[in-house]
Amino acid sequence: MEASEDHVKIVEELREAIGAENVIDWKIPRARRIYVAIKPEKLKEAVKHLTERNFEHISTISGVDVGDGVEVLYHLTRQGPGRGITISIRVKIPMENVSLPTITDIIPGATLYEREVHDFVGVVFVGHSDLSPVMLPDKWPKDVYPLLKKWKIEDIKKRLSEIGEN
Amino acid sequence: MGLITWARTRSPWLIHFNASSCNGCDIEVLAALMPRFDVERFGAILRGSPRHADVLVVTGSISMQVKDRLIRVYEQMPEPKFVVAVGACACGAGVFQKCYNTHDGVDKVIPVDAYIPGCAARPDAILDGVVKLLKKLGY
């Protein structure tokens, strides 16, 4: 199955909704898979727009350390008509200020995913009700985000030995 | 053989503790308890509470979060108590070796009496480990 015109239409509608200048890049590598890179300020608008077009299921949120910043990907899957299409919204935020607005008021199920991304790469989701550790242990030091490249395993082990672990 | 040793070696009651295991070893532990391999013929029986158990069967690598819980379960067991590490992860962290969040084996946290290697450990290996532990106790 080839990437059909309705895939392009989904992107076009999104571009219209949040403004074409806010869409940095987009690609459709294969059928039922869309990537759209947008500016972080327009994240909530984009998510709201997509949920209104049956992209109601959030598969997961992933956070990636890309060197000079953190890229956060919101993988939304379409339910109902045309289901199975996954659109990944890519948002890049600078290392100096790793914060994003929460989307839990639009999709409540994103709570756990946002907590996980906060655990591992330290993105602060402004407006989230509780960003306490969900994957990491209770005693985990607050400023250590293990999946950031700057944290080497030896450094983490050293920090843990300071609090009497490992 | 004294009466106490006789009684002890013929009813080693087990408590099974899953310390962040992938469930592979847990299934094999259950297979060892089932009629095909049948640890029960040595008097072993799986108990639900550490207070009733003599042998702690640990599977999986020891993460930072589970460490305190494991020690707590261990301390609830009455003396004399024995620990069996089942599988590569419990013996020496397996593929999780040197991860930022794991201890390299159960013996870094609590003393271990028998190691059963394998990923996952085979039920016959678990049976062999239990029998070796019983021999160590004077069966």
Image (spheres, rainbow, N blue to C red):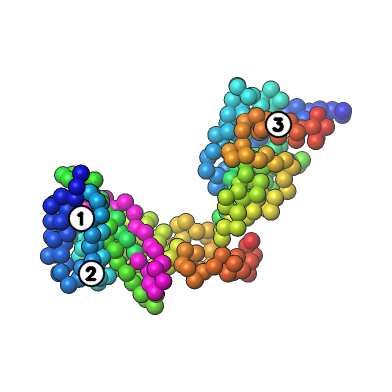
Residue B13 pos. (x, y %): 68, 32
Q: Nearer the viewer, mark 1 or mark 3?
A: 3
| Farthest residue, direction right | B1
Q: How far apart are labels 1 and 3 at the CA level?
A: 57 Å
Q: Tag 1: residue type? A: Thr
Q: Which residue is mark 2?
A: A24
Tag 2 secondary structure: strand
Mark 1 or mark 2: name the one nearer the start of the chain: 2
Binning the other alpha carbons within 10 Å of mark 1 as few (below 14), some (14 to 19) or many (20 upward) gives: some
Chain bearing tag 1 is A
| Quadrant in the picture for the C terminus of chain A | bottom right
Q: Is residue A164 left or right of residue A28?
A: right
Whether residue B100 is visible: yes
- Closest to the observer, A69 or A56: A69
Tag 3 secondary structure: helix
Q: How far apart are labels 2 and 3 at the CA level?
A: 62 Å
- What residue appears at the point 39 percent right and 78 percent down from the top-left corner? A96
Q: Which residue is mark 3?
A: B128
Q: Tag 2: residue type? A: Ile
Q: How far apart are labels 1 and 2 at the CA level?
A: 21 Å
Tag 1 secondary structure: helix
- The magenta stretch is A55-71
Chain bearing tag 2 is A
- What residue appears at the point 59 percent right and 40 percent down from the top-left corner? B119
Q: Which mark is residue A51?
A: 1
Q: Is residue B95 left or right of residue B52?
A: left
Chain bearing tag 3 is B
